[in-house]
Amino acid sequence: MSATEESAVTPVKADVSRITPRQALTLVALLWTTALTAITGLLAGNAQAGVAIHFHTTQIAWFTQGPQLISIFLTPFVMKFATVYGKKRMIVIITIAGLVGDVIAASATNYDMLLVGRVLAGAYVPTAALCFAMVRDVFPPRVVGTASGVLAASAGLVGLGGPFLSAWLIDDHGFRAALWFIAASTAGCLVLLLLCVRESPVRESDHRIDYVGGLLLGGGLTVAVYTLGEGSQWGWTSGKALAGFAIGVLALIAFFLYEARVTHPLIPLSIIKRDRMWSVVLATSITAGSVYAVGTAIQLLTLMPAIPHVSDGLGWSVTKNAVVGAPLSASVIIVAILTGKLAKKFDTRILLGIGGLLAVSAYVFASQVHSSVGAFLVLGLLSGPGMGLIVAVMPIMIIQFVNPEEQALANGSQWLVQGVMQVVITQLIFSVMTQHGTVAQGTQFYSNASFSSAFWLVAGTCLIGTLLVAAIPKARRIDTVKAGQAA
């Protein structure tokens, strides 16, 4: 047995009752890195109304969807490279690529250039999945659950402080200030990674990369999702739309057939099939994809202007939106951190199911009532705890089902499927909202029926994910899993 393999399975003998200063610095760096995708999404989401009006575009969907689309293509390769060459190394590389994209977007003089930068910035979207995988490699078993909960709480931390930050940036300085702040945050993240995070010792022994499988999977998903986004404009029965869906579906079928026969697959299907791991991936991905996708509808509802017979947006400032959304964000933080402790005592399936049901009830309520501050407070009190449970329990469930050396691939598989679900649900949100919307002076606006339809859609998809929890088998307790090392 090699030194690397031995470190991956040897129980921790040192005192693990507390986090050491070195581990605390590592956790801060991983927290910032995990939060980077969330803060970027939040700032971009709050900026999209201003961007749409400034550039007079009906294609604002790709401002937020472009990064997700490229991440879908890159994620299979990134996760495989991480298992072969090191997780930290891959996080640094894709963060550098994302920083270049951030600078291009912030300095863009036209919408096409802006989209190029945003798409390139999507290179660092998989960093969050790699950070969750790193937790197992650098923390002792007794704190793996808590550390995972802290990283998951980054969504709440961003949601609590991010809206006030974006309010100051966008309300006082415009959307471009938000884009430059994203670039600065990425640069800061890169510095922390280089100084505070050591490389994971967990490696896959085989260095061969399945490029054909990656191209089939990434290419097929990208074509299918892009077609879904353009379908309403092309016409769902048009030759373009049908050809796009056909190419995407055929590529995915070819991927599964190829992966079942190739000696060294990009994403070993054996991991997904083992212990019904597919049920964990699907349930967590659909519920998480739903709670993340709904943010698009909420941001457009609150920030688009109120124009009689044209737009039924509430016309709030980003500052007001931040104040009203604070209870939701606070509850996400509290519940996400507590989930790491609850997972030691309660079945994680129960936690995920409760989170899903809370989210579903919130979106059903919002489909009927969504035009007042009081309605948004109720929405936050229901969806906040639900989101906190969902985002915190996801990485814990993956840890419970796989071995240390499989962690990156397992997280990558879940992250990839979640990203696909989020993009697909978001595209469906734009599609149903556009059906009831109006184009004025080259800008897409939305009606009250648009927002009701969006909330009903997300409630339905989240319910599907919640029902899938019943298919998940019972797993090991989180404090009994093997760690990659005790840093």
Image (cartoon, rainbow, N blue to C red):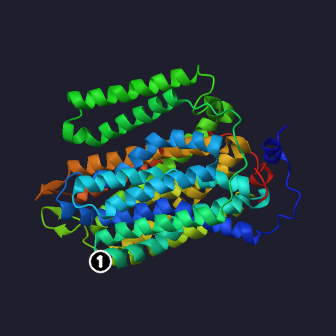
Q: Position of residue 299 (x, y in %)?
A: 34, 64
Q: Quadrant of residue 316?
A: bottom left
Q: Do we see residue 336 in this rendering?
A: no
Location of residue 57 in the rendering, given as x and y in whole percent from the top left corner: 19, 55
**Residue 433: image location, x then y, percent:** 26, 52
The residue most toward the left is: 441
Q: Does 108 sit left or right of 154 as displayed?
A: left
Q: Nearer the viewer, residue 268 or 471?
A: 268
397 left or right of 451 in image: right
Judging depth in this view, the residue of 262 and 146 nearest the camera is: 262
288 relative to 63 in the view: left or right: right
Q: Quadrant of the N terminus?
A: top right
Front residue of this view, candidates 54 and 113 = 113
Asked if residue 233 can be seen in this view, the reply is yes
Report which residue position mark 1 lands on. 173
In the rendered image, the quadrant that contains the C terminus is bottom right
Could you say which is closer to the camera, residue 176 or residue 146?
176
Which element carries disc 1, helix, strand or loop?
helix
Q: Mark 1: which amino acid?
A: His
Q: Residue at x 55, y 29 (%)?
A: 210
Q: What x and y, as percent, mark residue 189? A: 53, 65
Q: Is residue 261 above or below residue 278?
A: above
- Crowd class of label 1 (few under 14; some 14 to 19; many from 20; radius 10 Å): few
Residue in the image at 51% along x and 58% along y: 358
Residue displayed at 51% across by 50% down: 126
Which residue appears at 23% of the width and 30% of the height?
A: 240
Above or below, 34 relative to 200: below
Query: Would you identify the image quadrant in which residue 340 lies?
Result: bottom right
